[in-house]
Image: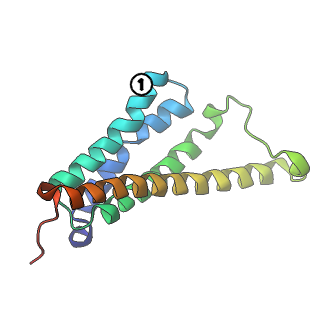
């Protein structure tokens, strides 16, 4: 993994962990707009900075992996904080599906969709930051990957 990503697995997960405080602050409504913005943008700036500094073989692939790990952590954190984040009033299906399923099944369906959404969000963030960072490595000679031996 280190050869392909240019970082050890521990660094990939460590970078992904930087996004967890925002998830907690969001789910528990602990941060105002300014703090929330910092919790959103500082971790992804650190992701990009580390990848540029380490001159990984492919910034896009590395940050896609970080984003995927972040998506897993996002999904787990949302599931752990599910009850707290909805203050005892969890979401429910609406429209034609309102009341169509037993409550336990409805909860399961909503949690599965939240899980998928979290994974997609993590991968999407990783891809977006990875694309920008990859572009920087192509434009700025000092950030180009080290030649492979």
Element class at badge 1: helix
Q: Residue furthest bottom?
A: 149
**Picture quadrant of residue 144:** bottom left
Which quarter of the image is occupied by the N terminus?
A: bottom left
**Picture quadrant of residue 65:** bottom left
Q: Is residue 98 visible?
A: no
Residue at position x 29%, y 48% in the image: 47
Q: Position of residue 24 (x, y in %)?
A: 48, 34
Q: Position of 134 compared to 80: left or right?
A: left
Q: Is residue 101 visible?
A: yes
Mark 1 is surrounded, within 10 Å at the Cα level, by few (under 14), some (14 to 19) or many (20 or more) other residues, namely few
Q: Residue furthest front?
A: 139
Residue at position x 42%, y 37% in the image: 40
Considering only vertical position in the picture, is 20 above or below 50?
A: above
Q: Position of 78 compared to 1: left or right?
A: right
For this rendering, which residue is in front, 116 or 58? Answer: 58
Which quarter of the image is occupied by the C terminus?
A: bottom left
Q: How is the image coloured?
A: rainbow
Q: Position of residue 141 (x, y in %)?
A: 13, 58
Q: Position of 113 compared to 69: left or right?
A: right
For this rendering, which residue is in front, 112 or 121? Answer: 121
**Picture quadrant of residue 46:** top left
- Residue bearing the label numbered 1: 35
Q: Position of residue 12 (x, y in %)?
A: 30, 56
């Amino acid at each position: 993994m280190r050869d392909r990503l240019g970082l050890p697995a521990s660094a990939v997960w460590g970078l992904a962990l930087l996004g967890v405080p925002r998830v907690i602050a969001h789910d528990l409504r602990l941060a105002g707009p300014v703090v929330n913005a910092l919790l959103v943008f500082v971790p992804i700036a650190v992701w990009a900075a580390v990848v540029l500094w380490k001159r990984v073989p492919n910034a896009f692939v590395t940050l896609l992996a970080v984003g995927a790990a972040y998506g897993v952590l996002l999904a787990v954190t949302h599931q752990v904080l599910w009850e707290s984040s909805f203050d005892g009033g969890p979401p429910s299906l609406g429209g034609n599906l309102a009341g169509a399923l037993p409550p336990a099944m409805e909860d399961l369906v909503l949690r599965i969709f939240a899980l998928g959404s979290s994974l997609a969000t993590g991968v999407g963030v990783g891809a977006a930051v990875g694309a920008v960072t990859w572009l920087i490595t192509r434009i700025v000679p000092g950030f180009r990957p080290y030649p492979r031996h």
